[in-house]
Image (cartoon, coloured by chain):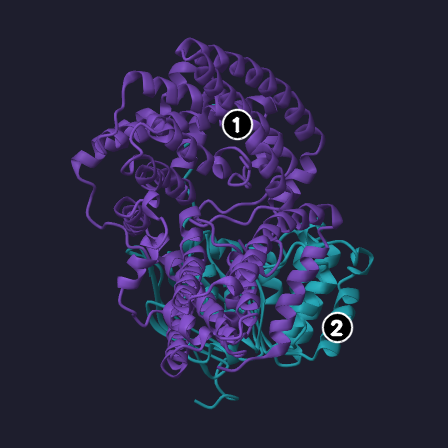
Chain colours: A cyan, B purple
Amino acid sequence: MNGELSPAIDIRDLRKVYGGKAAVDGLTLTVNRGSFFGFLGPNGAGKTTTIRMLMGLAAPTTGEIGILGMKMPGQALDIRARIGLVPDDSLLFDHLTGLEFVEFSGRMYKLEKDVARARAAELIELFELESSRKKIIGQYSKGMRKRVAMAAALIHRPDLFLLDEPFEGVDAVGARLMKDILNEQVRRGATIFLTSHVLEVVERLCDRVAIINDGRLVVDAPMSELRSGQETLEDIFVRVVGGVERNAEALDWL
Amino acid sequence: MTLSGNQVRAIVGAQWRAWLNQGPKAQWAMWLVYLIWYGFASTLAWAAATVLPEIKESARLMQIVELVLLAGLLYWQVIPLMLASAGMALDLKRLLVYPVEPSNLFLIEVLLRLSTGMEVCIVLSGVSVGLWSRPDVPVWGPLFFVPYLAFNMVLSAGIRDLLARLMAKRGIRELVVLGLVTLSALPQLLLMMFPPEQWRGQQVFGFLDRIPTMPLPWTVTAHAALGDGAAWAAPLAVLWLAGGLWFGFRQFIKGLTWDGQETPKPAAPEPAVSSRSDGLIEKLYRAPSLLFRDPLAMLIEKELRFLSRAPRFRLIFFMGFSFGLIIWFPLAFREGRQGGMMAENFLVWVSLYATLMLGDVLFWNCFGFDRQAVQAYFIVPVRFSTILIAKNLAAVFFLLLEVSLVALACSLFRVEVTPDKVLEAFAVTLLVSLMLLAVGNLMSVRYPRPADPSSSWRNASGGKVQFLLLVIYPVISVPVALAYLARYGFGTDLAFYSALGCGYLVAGITYWVSMESAVEYATRSQETAIAALSSNEGPFGG
């Protein structure tokens, strides 16, 4: 496979089974380079498991994963070096300051110490965390933690971003900043793979959307195609995933 | 294997900064604990450095060095298993997202194994000084301790990874513990066969003389260190190191690719018998409602459910009545010791051992497992004292169950278990647990630490907590010690139980006072407690 022409993510018949139950079941998906891709699904649909497999943190039961023209898990280290991850559950170290953590991330991506330090300082300033530079991450608000995670994901200028709920808990100013930065990354040719429950954000940012339910792909279409009908993304999501019928009698005390 | 010094330095540096960022208050106590503990190891090292030059016979010297090396290996590899506390290790969950060579991670993991065996290094440095003082030992000889220490480190890393994977699987975990229990009985059986009373003069060494020399790690290292047969011993020592390295690295790599959730669940429906037993267990969980009103009853029920499902708690609970019994049994009942104090009070002894084992999960850090729930405790309209009491009652329930199981296990071992002895065991254990709860409630709110209930291995306690435990355990033992002193002095059970009664009075007052203080402190510092329980320190985990 030619590394430069291949898709950013190329998943073939991916399956992950935990204790007899498939968390991801026959997922086939292609994400082109330079796209802003929304990966949606209800809670427990298999989004985080998919991201874990894309990072090589969980081994697929069956199926193939190609990332940036390389095979996961065979070339896991080379792939990780080109990915920027913003995880859903924080992988931050709470007893480091934001600056220290971002510098740590840079050095883990094999940047020279001086380069990592300089970039970390710039990113901390960019994400408006300068005033809290002496605070340890444990004292940060949820939104500040997400900003630090985003700064750490950017430091090595990755080609692919895996973002799991990046805007959760982030205020409007921070969210706008993050969106602007992500759009800039797409313009320079990077690929964004985003999961979010805020469908309005996905609708505004993404050029293509996939929805999984119970580990299976139920929608994979360009946003323009989805927008062409009468339905909003939320309507489509609820329709394909299946809403809950409320039993009014059973909850009449409510 | 390729090593990137930059990444290794970044990981170690981040941990160092995380530690510094905790502030000097958190560090002084740790240094103090290190000073006491490593001071003890240094004393042993000094004794070795002084005694070894005086030994005349070189054959005797060889045996002593072999024994020291064997003891070092056992201390390094076996003691962490017996305490289910394997020291510091890399927090791989948060490091694997980076493109780090596994060899770099393995290098750090191996270096971290020093946290469970630094004492061995100190003692062996004393042995080296002692050997260097002898003219018959070549200068390069003691340098062979270095590959021996490295062998211990890689072996320890491999064992830790292997056990971490095995212990995560229900069923296999219990089997592994059973295997470890059996293994731990081996030295005790040897003690029974060769009681220390017979270790006089030349007998021990005579026995050791009869054991054929085998190319075991400690044997070859001793020979290489003393320059005796170094031509064959030295390559063997290096071979052992290579074998240890292969084992350690292989286990580490397996651990990297294992995501810990592969345990298959039974596909077939549960059999009827299981449903019945589930029903019984469900009734047991709901039993607090028969004795107490909500919210206390519900809180106790939650504790019972939560603890009985936590792998860490289950492991320690199982070890309490299995390990404890096997470790102490031969020491109490070995030949010539029938009727000794330990034998007479065996049930109490093992019960107290089990109580102390459970200390970390039931007393000292009772919110550690509960880190997600702590915020809810401050939000729900329930007095904080009710929450502590619920936790304490659940702890007492499990302790009483543990003592009952110890009594049952003792009777299986044909130890005399009379109703008097069972009553005494319950009375003493309850008194100690009351004191432990009194102090534990305070410590749980003052020094809360996040703990992982799904991990079978203990997180390292903070230095201050370790220091406090060193002081607290002897103080807590005083009322029980006085009760036994009273029985010894007056020769009656009445004196014993009267003293125990006084102990209960003191413990009750202590509990009441500490409960007031704990509630007041928790209310005042809830924000700090929540923050402390939700923190992840650095690249190193427990």
In percent of width and height, residue B92 lies at 51, 63
Quarter of the image for residue B221 reads: bottom left
Mark 1 touches mark 2? (CB < 8 Å): no
Q: Residue furthest front?
A: B56
Query: A163 or B156: nearer the eye?
Result: B156
Identify the residue at image location x=37%, y=57%: B163
In the picture provided, is A20 more to the left or to the right than B369? left
Q: Residues within 10 Å of mark 2 (few under 14, many from 20)?
A: many
Q: Nearer the viewer, mark 1 or mark 2?
A: 1
Identify the residue at image location x=62%, y=66%: A205
Q: Chain of mark 1?
A: B
Image disc number at residue B477:
1
In the picture provided, is A234 more to the left or to the right than B337? right
Q: Is residue A240 above or below residue B298?
A: below
Identify the residue at image location x=42%, y=36%: B307
Q: Residue furthest bottom?
A: A2
Q: Which residue is mark 2?
A: A117
Q: Is residue B230 above or below residue B447?
A: below
Type of amino acid at the residue the image marks with label 1: Ser
Q: Is residue B273 visible?
A: yes
Query: B423 or A23: nearer the eye?
Result: B423
